[in-house]
Amino acid sequence: MFTGLSAFPLTPLANDAVDEPSFIRIMERLAASGTDSITALGSTGSYTYLTGAERAKVAHLAVEHAGGTPVFIGVGALRTSHVLANVREAERAGASAVLLAPVTYQALTADDVFELYRAVSENTDLPVIVYDNPGTTHFTFTHELYGRIAGLPGIASIKIPGVPTDPVKAEEHIQAIRAVVPGHVTIGVSGDAFAATGLNAGCDAWYSVIGGTLPRLALGISHLAQGGRTDEATAESERIAPLWNLFNEFGGSLRVIAAIAEHLGLAQHRSLPLPIQGLNKNQRARVAEVVNELGLGD
Amino acid sequence: MFTGLSAFPLTPLANDAVDEPSFIRIMERLAASGTDSITALGSTGSYTYLTGAERAKVAHLAVEHAGGTPVFIGVGALRTSHVLANVREAERAGASAVLLAPVTYQALTADDVFELYRAVSENTDLPVIVYDNPGTTHFTFTHELYGRIAGLPGIASIKIPGVPTDPVKAEEHIQAIRAVVPGHVTIGVSGDAFAATGLNAGCDAWYSVIGGTLPRLALGISHLAQGGRTDEATAESERIAPLWNLFNEFGGSLRVIAAIAEHLGLAQHRSLPLPIQGLNKNQRARVAEVVNELGLGD
């Protein structure tokens, strides 16, 4: 279940509340796309910005409208007891797994993070995906810590940040992680610009921002890479370099992907939680240009 | 009101709930100490780890047990609407001001942060203290942004992180900030090891972690520096270097100050919110040693 494409939908807001009709439409579109799994309430799903009640509602809507596609739910929070409450709601919603990042305000030690994963693994029968996202958590996993955590019962997968751009180094990087985790734990790449390289280097899965809003595009790359057509996967990823460039230029993927969803009518204008303003008018025009040039409008 | 020592109390937990009797005792001790103000629900007060209801309760308890000492309340949160709800509760509690950091999960732009402060300043008559704490928020203020925000109505003070250790450079640093903010906006130093240097260099206030748990010690340094006895202030800060060394060695001030509070009987064992484990047995023994050697047990 923790292989192939996992698509990360946005959780669009409207007037500072979850825009449930838009979220349902996004989920139904993903369910129809053939994605291998859907991860709701990831970073792309603005999980840390939502209340516990909003997160519970989104988790339930996600499973109800996934048409049988496995749904993973992000459960991270600053306080362990809040994480466990989110896990409970994910179970109630019928999620297939939970995704857990070590969210920080005060910097955490390796032992703090290990004990967080232990508390979750001891308190649920759901598989747990380790979410290594240093850009937002500012926590750095070592391979040693991957190994300690992956040895806990219930750990199913590790979502790693980007891989080295050099294919040989990327392969070495994945092999170094495999060497410290049990064989049943899959490794999934994130940082969409690295996905083709990561999949070609042997990653089992792609935890994908663009998969949640542009599933056809992401599935194309995923199928090429996992079908062994590595050069074509690389070429397709290079073809959409203008999109990756916007991610870099506009401070990450979230603001850009939200602007794309708004441009495609999948979310209302200004769908991100304040204080995140989202892109300005000129930036949105640039995004629309790239969407049209690359034919991303599914 | 935004000068002198502002003491930052811990919000001790017990069994994953706010330990209200301990918090009340800490507040009453601070009220009796003669500190110029008290800032509850700062980083030292674990504000981001608490629910809205817990924060409201702590804000009310803080003002009720401050014996007339001005109380500032930390209102930061990831989502602007949650910040505004915290501001509303601070007003209801009778706070004298609010302290606001740009808490992040997704990195924020300067415009995002400016609009956050604008939203707050437009929605309250309480003075606002700008909380620049890059170690926890991972947001970097420029002097230009200080200037833009300080020009908003209601901005009363800026809590800056440490200053350069060289006294001349520290003075230049403070003057450079003064040059971009209106004259009524005070500048307060934080990063306790820098306090004597910062106050000697002309900071109006010290926003102090140790002030919340060791008020006698902090008031000593504050009175020396603000009374013009700069060499004695520096000497007193240097005398307690073993404490600053523990802050560095044990990953910041919070775990150490919580261990000190627990050692002094001001909080129960393991008073920090999980997943923060706090110090281990050997580390606590080192802390106790330093407390005894330096005579910090008030």
Image (cartoon, coloured by chain):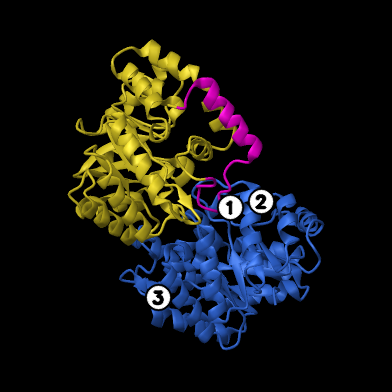
Chain colours: A blue, B yellow
Residue shown at 57% from the left, 82% from the top: A94
Residue type, numbered disc 3: Ala
Q: x, y percentage for residue B64? A: 25, 47
Mark 3 crowdedness (10 Å alpha carbons): few <14, some 14-19, many ≥20: many
Vertical comparison of A199 with A65: above or below:
above
Q: Nearer the viewer, residue A180 or B283?
A: B283
Task: Residue A267: give its label.
Answer: 3
Mark 2 crowdedness (10 Å alpha carbons): few <14, some 14-19, many ≥20: some
Query: Which chain contains the residue that carries disc 2?
Result: A
| Camera-side mark, 3 or 2 | 2
Judging by the rendered image, the residue that carries numbered circle 2 is A141
Query: Which chain contains the residue that carries disc 3?
Result: A
Rendered image quadrant of residue B250: top right
Do the dots labelled 3 and 1 sit on one chain? yes
From mark 3 to mark 2, how far is it between C-alphas?
34 Å
Q: Mark 3 or 1 closer to N-term?
A: 1
Residue shown at 38% from the left, 23% from the top: B198
From mark 1 to mark 2, how far is it between C-alphas?
8 Å
User: Is residue B78 left or right of A116 when viewed as pictured?
Assistant: left
Residue type, numbered disc 1: Pro
| Camera-side mark, 1 or 2 | 2
Rendered image quadrant of residue B178: top left
Q: x, y percentage for residue A32? A: 56, 87
Mark 1 crowdedness (10 Å alpha carbons): few <14, some 14-19, many ≥20: some
Query: Which chain contains the residue that carries disc 1?
Result: A
Can residue B151 be seen in the rendering of this structure? Answer: no
Judging by the rendered image, the residue that carries numbered circle 1 is A134
Q: x, y percentage for residue B137? A: 45, 46
Do the dots labelled 1 and 2 sit on one chain? yes
